[in-house]
Image (cartoon, rainbow, N blue to C red):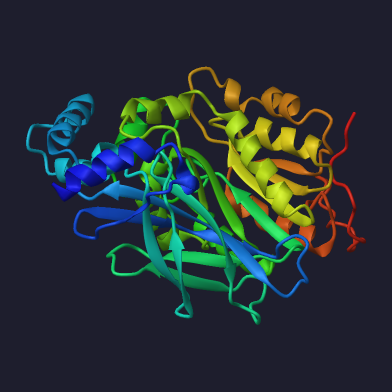
């Protein structure tokens, strides 16, 4: 009876979000929560000695809908031509659970931040997601430092907060086919790499990201992807295994609908990525950003649009040329020339192997905006004073 009353109350108040007058604490026996990695920043108008961060939590009923899960597993196994009872079905079921788990509006959870103090997150909105801005007790924190927080009394993965000062280097990185092999453009390849195969990093990218993280003085990394939040645990574990820490900015667009996941990858949400980059610009307008993406979707166009919108904010754009495709139009030189029309040619580079990027990045940090040899075999010129604007608008 208690659960029925709680569910009815949640449904009645789910549209109120943080204004919900009847929030309910989550029950660890019946509910679960995902805590999402974030960044701490200096609040605007502050005295420069304090930090705050937006903490995002997603609440769910603990057990998936088993009937729906069984049907979805069978459907995907059939699409991938797997034999009935194939051992891969267990992996498929585990990764599909977020698509068959009911979201939980109107609930709260207590977290412990870095072992120093507790705070309450929630209540979640109608999507079961809460966002709370919380002061951080970290007077001695430095740029690039991290701190872990965990839900009190709840068995779930911790979240990592990265402290980010107003100035310095920063990175925006795509995920699918930029740092992880997904097979975007081939629905069968996407389904297999997402629900069956062990996630595989793009060859050479973990080493380059480690080099970049060191070269850019532990620069924060935001992983910006069109993949839906259903994949957060899957992608979080992949990132932890291969890449520097950083928030996963995923698309909150497809709960309990796998078809919407495929749609997200085929609709090429350029607007979504540009909106997220505008949010980053609002919080960190004085950071110098390196953007990394690939040719399978609209990363070149999204990065170029943002570059034009905020001249000087983006200092380098690296696009991985992914082989394949039906007509070769996505990897044609004309596509990139059109996407980056009006932008300094020294700012963007299309690469086939990550090894091409080391010299460019090192030269960028040394002060050379083009970061490359000019094709004559001559080394880049000596370090120059940092340019105030790297985007050239026509």
Quarter that holds the C terminus: top right
Give the x, y percent position of residue 293.
59, 41
Residue at 67% x, 24% y is: 335
Residue at 73% x, 32% y is: 305
Residue at 17% x, 26% y is: 78
Residue 196 showing in the rendered view? no
User: Residue 306 falls in which quadrant of the image?
Assistant: top right
Give the x, y percent position of residue 284.
73, 55
Residue 277 showing in the rendered view? yes
* Viewer-side residue, 301 vs 139: 139
Residue at 39% x, 32% y is: 254
In the displayed structure image, the side of residue 22 where residue 331 appears, left or right = right
Give the x, y percent position of residue 6.
25, 46
* Viewer-side residue, 8 vs 64: 8
* Viewer-side residue, 93 vs 201: 93
* Viewer-side residue, 1 vs 48: 1
Give the x, y percent position of residue 280.
67, 49
What is the residue that sits farthest to the front in this orientation? 21
What is the residue that sits farthest to the left in this orientation? 85
Count of picture labels: 0
In the displayed structure image, the side of residue 308 where residue 201 appears, left or right = left
What is the residue that sits farthest to the top in this orientation? 327
User: Residue 328 falls in which quadrant of the image?
Assistant: top right
């Amino acid at each position: 009876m208690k659960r029925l009353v709680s569910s009815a109350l949640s449904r009645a108040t789910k549209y109120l979000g943080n204004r919900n007058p009847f929030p309910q604490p989550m029950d660890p026996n019946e509910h679960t929560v995902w805590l999402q990695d974030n960044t701490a920043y200096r609040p605007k108008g502050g005295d420069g000695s304090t930090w705050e961060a937006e903490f995002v939590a997603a609440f769910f009923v603990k057990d998936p809908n088993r009937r729906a899960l069984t049907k979805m597993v069978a459907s995907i196994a059939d699409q991938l031509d797997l034999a009935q009872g194939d051992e891969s079905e267990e992996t498929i079921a585990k990764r599909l659970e977020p698509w068959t788990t009911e979201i939980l509006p109107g609930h709260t959870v207590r977290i412990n931040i870095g072992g120093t103090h507790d705070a309450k997150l929630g209540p979640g909105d109608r999507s079961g997601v809460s966002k709370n801005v919380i002061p951080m007790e970290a007077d001695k924190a430095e740029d690039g430092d991290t701190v872990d927080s965990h839900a009190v009394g709840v068995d779930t993965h911790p979240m990592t907060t990265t402290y980010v000062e107003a100035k310095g280097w920063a990175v925006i990185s795509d995920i699918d086919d930029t740092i992880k092999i997904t097979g975007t453009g081939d629905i069968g390849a996407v389904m297999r790499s997402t629900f069956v195969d062990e996630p595989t990093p793009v060859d050479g990218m973990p080493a380059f990201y480690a080099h970049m993280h060191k070269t850019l003085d532990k620069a924060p990394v935001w992983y910006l992807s069109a993949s839906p939040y259903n994949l957060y645990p899957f992608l979080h574990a992949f990132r932890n295994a291969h890449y520097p820490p950083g928030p996963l900015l995923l698309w909150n667009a497809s709960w309990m609908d796998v078809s919407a996941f495929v749609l997200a990858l085929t609709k090429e949400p350029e607007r979504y990525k540009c909106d997220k980059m505008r949010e980053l610009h609002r919080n960190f307008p004085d950071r110098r950003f390196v953007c990394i993406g690939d040719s399978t979707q609209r990363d070149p166009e999204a990065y170029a649009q943002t570059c034009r919108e905020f001249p000087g904010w983006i200092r380098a754009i690296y696009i991985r040329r992914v082989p394949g495709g039906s007509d070769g139009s996505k990897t044609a030189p004309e596509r990139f020339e059109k996407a980056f029309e009006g932008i300094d040619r020294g700012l963007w580079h299309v690469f086939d192997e990550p090894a091409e990027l080391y010299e460019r990045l090192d030269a960028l940090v040394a002060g050379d905006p083009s970061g490359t040899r000019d094709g004559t075999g001559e080394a880049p010129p000596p370090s120059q004073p940092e340019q105030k604007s790297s985007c050239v608008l026509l």
